[in-house]
Image: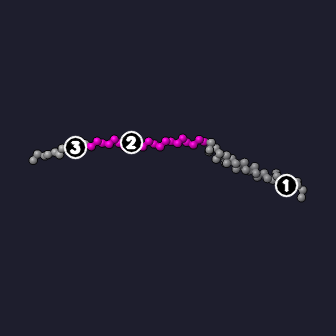
Amino acid sequence: MTPMAPLPEAPEREPPPKLLPVKSPVTLPRSLPTIPPPPTMPPPAPIPPPPAIPPPPSIPPLVLPR
C-alpha cells in the first residue's frame, strides 16, 4: 500500500469547501451579538391617579316648607 493512495483522496475531499457556504450562515449569528441590544426603555412611569375629588361641603339637609 503506497502512501500515495491518500494523496489522491485529498482532491476528492473537495466537499469540505462546501463547508464555507455552511459557515456563511454561521457568521450571521455572530453578527447578531455585534448589534448592541436595544436600549432598555425605562418602564413607563405609572399614571398618577386623578386628584382625589374633595368631598362636597356638607350641605345641611334641605327642610322643605310644608
First to last magenta residue range = 35-55
**Disc 2 residue type?**
Pro
Q: In front: mark 1 or mark 2?
A: 2
Q: Is tag 1's residue or tag 2's residue first in the polypeptide sequence?
A: 1
**Label 3–label 2 contact, CB within 8 A:** no
Which residue is denoted by mark 1 in the rendering? 6
Which residue is denoted by mark 2 in the rendering? 48
Kindly identify which numbered label has been placed on residue 58: 3
Around disc 2, counting alpha carbons within 10 Å, would you say few (fewer than 14), some (14 to 19), or many (20 or more)? few
Q: Residue at x 59, y 41 (%)?
A: 36
Could you tell whether 20 is left or right of 39 in the image? right
Element carrying mark 2: loop
* Residue 36, placed above or below residue 12: above
Q: Is tag 3's residue or tag 2's residue first in the polypeptide sequence?
A: 2
Element carrying mark 3: loop
**Label 1–label 2 contact, CB within 8 A:** no
